[in-house]
Amino acid sequence: MLGPSETPRGPRDSFVELAAGQRIYQRNNGPARPLDLPRGYRPVAPILANDPPPEASSGLLGFPATVARALLERHAPAFLVIGPKDEVLLIGPGAESYVKMATGPVSLGLRKLILPVLEPAVKRLLTGLALGPGTFRQIEVADSGGDLPQRLVLSAQALEDGNRMVTFTPLESHAVPDEGSEARIVIDEAYVSQLEDELEDARQTIRTTIEELETSNEELKSSNEEMMSMNEELQSANEELSTTNEELQNKLRELNEANADLANFTESTQIATVFLDDGFRLRNFTPEAVAYFRFVEQDRGRALEDIGSRLDMHALLESCRRVAATGLPEEQDFSTQDGKAEVTVRFAPYRADGLSGGGVVFSIFDVTTVARYARQLEQATAEARARLEEIEELYRVSPTAMALIGTDYRYLRVNPHFAEINGLSIEDHIDRRVDEVLPELGSVVLGPIDEVLRTGKPLLRQILRGQTPADPDSTRIWEVDWYPVRQGGKIRAIGMNVRDMTSHMDMQADLRRIMRELQHRVKNMLSNVIALVNRARRETGDPKAVLETLDQRIRALAHTHNLLTAENWASTAIRDVLTPELLQIYGRDRVILRGPELRLNARGTLAVGMAVHELATNAAKYGAFSCPTGRVHVYWSRLDEGEGERLILRWMESGGPPVSNPEREGFGTQLIRSLVAGTMGGTIRMIWEPQGLEAVLNLPWDAATEVDYDTDVDPLQPSSPLSGGRGDHRAGDGGHPS
């Protein structure tokens, strides 16, 4: 066991650590280190831990232990017992003269213990024993010097347990007595034993004294080390105190500077601030607080409620109590009692040491101007919001398609009409590129956007043609306005107004076509009317009847024009052409119409309409419509006999007076042939049957039904019989018109 400042000396393998904290060590089972005593001292041979003590031994060769000890000490030569690893296991009596105990770490190796002068001989002896054939070897050493005998015999014997025994036998220089010599040395054993005991006691005392001396030396060293450590600690403490003193001085200077900064800050802010303690008594105030409280220097320490104020004292103290109770700051708006000023009061807990509550501090800010501006701002915001809502509503319901495109060509917003044009929802447009939404029109749309971004000027009334996902099968025409939208002087986006001009452009084309057709048709219609008038003027007979016939023909022409005008001069259903001339006049019991639904173009309408009018007029005068039992069947069909499609219209009369082939053609027949053959390129065949007339109109299908807006052939173009030829002079309407 060691003291707090002691450490085990020598090699660490001599002790086993039991408790390092308590500095407790246990000696191992190795042999004890002999003391460094004078050379003449004969120590007791070391005893291994596993060997029994000498008193417990059974003796040598059956002799008692005392006898064996006497033999070993007085008659046996000095010897050493060496282990397999050349470690000294046993030092026999007298062998201490041949070993040494060096200072420093203790080692039991033979080479460390044997005297240096004997080391080569012992090494040679053990090597020869190990390499030789026998178990015993002996050599002689002479003139070793020092206190050693002049002649010395070293012997080595291999033992059965694997150890070896080395003996040291001195040889005298004079002759050795014979075995029968009577020479003896008489020694008083009792006296020698007493001397040996006293010597052993002296040795033990010396060892104890040396150990105590070493212990005292260690303790002194430890005390010295502790004193030095304490000195160092005191020096460190002194340095720390000096450092702390400097830090306190710095903190004090910083505190003074902070107080000065706080005072200057309070004066520079010119904010009315009041400090209250935990009893809501006045602790301090800034000069600006006098504008709201009747403070004087003597009021410090008085309760705030006892001091006059321009503000609502009750509400003010309620806020102070609430902040002191919750520890949370708050802000309240107050008006002065005279209503001339509006203030905002900010309350906060006053903490004296940063933790515990020390009262309340509040600051007063005059917000009269700010409040007025806030009210104006709120009113302006409401108006702006209302205008924005109006704009949003206009943007939503505007019939014009509108969009806003960013500088990265992505849609920022679109209105419903714009989304409807593209066939996508509004959400599908936002944050998508223009060329992604409209791949077909992407390159066309990006050009004007780049132009507006480059020049900063709007592009108006730009015509754009193309297809959209909403109607991919038709080409639409749009008129587009592009304009920059600026923010802070920079172009933030590109506005886009789109108007669908397809119907407008179609209407303009229709108007141009109608005007062109109207010019031709009015001219030709007037020519036809003039021709009809000239023809009537040359006819003989009752002038009233001639005028009546002329009136009916002009009315039929006008009726056909009305049908075409109602259909925008495009096409007319064939039933609409026949019904006014037949069904509306003679009724369904006398007129039968049969045929598929088809539409006649302008030329076909005029040709069929005028032909049916002339046939009906002829039937009313001389044919089926001239008696109550007469009937007319009209059939039409689409026929293809290998020479192109044809429109066949059959007029069949029955139940009327008998008819015969006329001797000459009247003006009505000439008019029909002029319209059918001259205008339409068709034929007409008259068959005179006794039961009634049968007329067959054979017209080219395309010429009668195909609508051609750009044709230069006028449907009212007169044929040669009406243009003033010789036939006009011979024609008359006497008798049957056919």
Image (cartoon, rainbow, N blue to C red):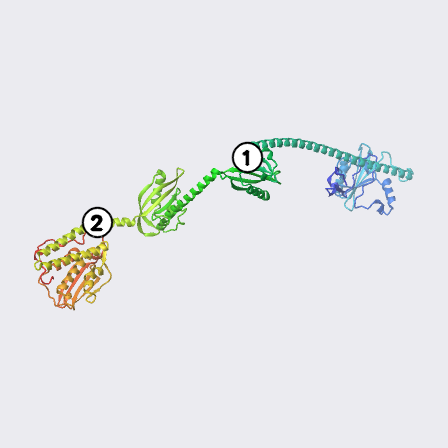
Q: Is residue 525 left or right of residue 386?
A: left
Name the image quarter holding residue 222: top right
User: Is disc 2 placed on a helix, strand or loop?
Assistant: helix
Q: CA distance from mark 2 to mark 1?
A: 91 Å
Depth check: give the residue in front, 272 or 576: 272
Q: Which mark is residue 101?
A: none
User: Is disc 1 placed on a helix, strand or loop?
Assistant: helix
Q: Amino acid at mark 2?
A: Met
Where 653 falls versus 531 (above or below)? below
Q: Dot 2 surroundings within 10 Å: few (below 14), some, or many (20 or more)?
A: few
Where 648 falls versus 63 (above or below)? below
- In the rendered image, is residue 100 in sight? no
Depth check: give the residue in front, 3 or 383: 383
**Residue 409 image point, x, y percent:** 38, 43
Where the C terminus falls, by quadrant?
Answer: bottom left
Q: Amino acid at mark 1?
A: Val
Q: Which mark is residue 515?
A: 2
- Residue matched to label 1: 290
Q: Counting residues from the N terminus, which is met first, the one under dot 2 or under dot 1?
A: 1
**Residue 192 image point, x, y percent:** 89, 38
Q: How many marks?
A: 2
Where 736 falls versus 263 (above or below)? below
Depth check: give the residue in front, 106 or 293: 293
